[in-house]
Protein backbone atom coordinates (compact mmCIF):
# COMPACT_ATOMS: atom_id res chain seq x y z
CA UNK A 1 0.00 0.00 0.00
CA UNK A 2 1.32 3.44 -0.99
CA UNK A 3 1.00 6.20 1.56
CA UNK A 4 0.69 9.74 0.24
CA UNK A 5 1.36 12.82 2.31
CA UNK A 6 0.55 16.32 1.08
CA UNK A 7 2.38 19.25 2.55
CA UNK A 8 1.14 22.78 1.93
CA UNK A 9 3.55 25.64 2.45
CA UNK A 10 2.39 29.23 2.49
CA UNK A 11 4.94 31.80 1.58
CA UNK A 12 4.37 35.45 2.37
CA UNK A 13 5.96 37.69 -0.19
CA UNK A 14 7.11 41.26 0.25
CA UNK A 15 8.81 42.72 -2.73
CA UNK A 16 10.36 46.07 -2.03
CA UNK A 17 10.91 47.53 -5.45
CA UNK A 18 12.57 50.80 -4.61
CA UNK A 19 12.68 53.45 -1.98
CA UNK A 20 10.84 56.65 -2.79
CA UNK A 21 12.47 59.21 -0.52
CA UNK A 22 12.99 58.09 3.05
CA UNK A 23 9.44 58.10 4.36
CA UNK A 24 7.70 55.81 1.91
CA UNK A 25 8.47 52.93 -0.37
CA UNK A 26 6.82 51.04 -3.15
CA UNK A 27 5.92 47.42 -2.72
CA UNK A 28 3.56 44.84 -4.11
CA UNK A 29 0.13 45.01 -2.46
CA UNK A 30 -1.50 41.58 -2.61
CA UNK A 31 -4.96 43.14 -2.22
CA UNK A 32 -4.53 45.62 -5.09
CA UNK A 33 -2.51 43.02 -7.01
CA UNK A 34 -0.24 45.86 -7.99
CA UNK A 35 2.80 47.82 -6.95
CA UNK A 36 1.66 50.65 -4.69
CA UNK A 37 3.12 53.20 -2.34
CA UNK A 38 3.40 51.79 1.17
CA UNK A 39 3.44 53.95 4.28
CA UNK A 40 4.56 53.24 7.82
CA UNK A 41 1.70 53.33 10.34
CA UNK A 42 2.98 56.65 11.70
CA UNK A 43 3.21 58.15 8.23
CA UNK A 44 -0.28 56.90 7.40
CA UNK A 45 -1.55 58.55 10.59
CA UNK A 46 0.00 61.85 9.49
CA UNK A 47 -1.55 61.57 6.02
CA UNK A 48 -4.97 60.68 7.46
CA UNK A 49 -4.62 63.25 10.27
CA UNK A 50 -5.51 60.69 12.89
CA UNK A 51 -3.71 58.66 15.55
CA UNK A 52 -1.52 55.62 14.85
CA UNK A 53 -3.98 53.72 17.02
CA UNK A 54 -6.78 54.52 14.57
CA UNK A 55 -4.61 53.17 11.73
CA UNK A 56 -4.02 49.90 13.62
CA UNK A 57 -7.76 49.71 14.31
CA UNK A 58 -8.62 50.18 10.62
CA UNK A 59 -6.11 47.47 9.72
CA UNK A 60 -7.73 45.12 12.26
CA UNK A 61 -11.16 45.88 10.75
CA UNK A 62 -9.82 45.07 7.30
CA UNK A 63 -10.43 48.61 6.05
CA UNK A 64 -6.80 49.10 5.03
CA UNK A 65 -4.51 46.96 2.91
CA UNK A 66 -1.30 46.16 4.69
CA UNK A 67 1.78 44.03 4.64
CA UNK A 68 4.55 43.35 7.11
CA UNK A 69 8.27 43.52 6.60
CA UNK A 70 10.55 40.68 7.69
CA UNK A 71 11.19 42.75 10.82
CA UNK A 72 7.46 42.82 11.61
CA UNK A 73 7.02 46.46 10.63
CA UNK A 74 3.50 47.27 9.45
CA UNK A 75 3.17 48.93 6.05
CA UNK A 76 -0.08 50.48 4.84
CA UNK A 77 -1.15 50.57 1.20
CA UNK A 78 -1.66 54.22 0.28
CA UNK A 79 -4.38 53.35 -2.28
CA UNK A 80 -6.58 51.79 0.39
CA UNK A 81 -5.93 54.73 2.73
CA UNK A 82 -6.98 57.16 -0.02
CA UNK A 83 -10.15 55.16 -0.69
CA UNK A 84 -10.98 55.04 3.02
CA UNK A 85 -10.47 58.78 3.48
CA UNK A 86 -12.81 59.51 0.56
CA UNK A 87 -15.58 57.44 2.10
CA UNK A 88 -14.97 58.76 5.63
ZN1 LIG B 1 -3.59 47.89 -1.77
Image (cartoon, grey):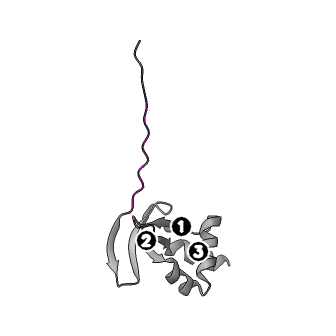
Residue for point 51% across, 61% down:
31
Whether disc 1's CB lies below 8 Å from ligand 1 is answered yes
Where is residue 39 shown, x and y percent of the image?
47, 77
The local crowd at label 2, few if under 14, some if 14 to 19, many if 20 or more residues have their Cα within 10 Å, is some
The local crowd at label 3, few if under 14, some if 14 to 19, many if 20 or more residues have their Cα within 10 Å, is few
Whether disc 2's CB lies below 8 Å from ligand 1 is answered yes
Which range is magenta?
Answer: 5-14
Q: Which residue is the site of mark 2?
A: 36
User: Foreground mark, 1 or 3?
Assistant: 1
Q: Which residue is the site of mark 3?
A: 83
Where is residue 30 shown, x and y percent of the image?
46, 60
Task: Specify the farthest residue to the front.
Answer: 71
> Residue 4: which quarter of the image?
top left
Residue for point 60% across, 87% down:
49
- Main SS of the magenta segment? loop
Q: Which residue is the site of mark 1?
A: 65
Position of 17 with respect to 40 (left or right) is left
User: Circles 3 and 2: CB distance less than 8 Å?
Assistant: no
SS label for mark 1: loop
The magenta stretch spans residue 16: no
Amino acid sequence: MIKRTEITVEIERLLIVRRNGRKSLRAFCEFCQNETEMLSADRAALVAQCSSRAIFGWVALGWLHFTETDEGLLLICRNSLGDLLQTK
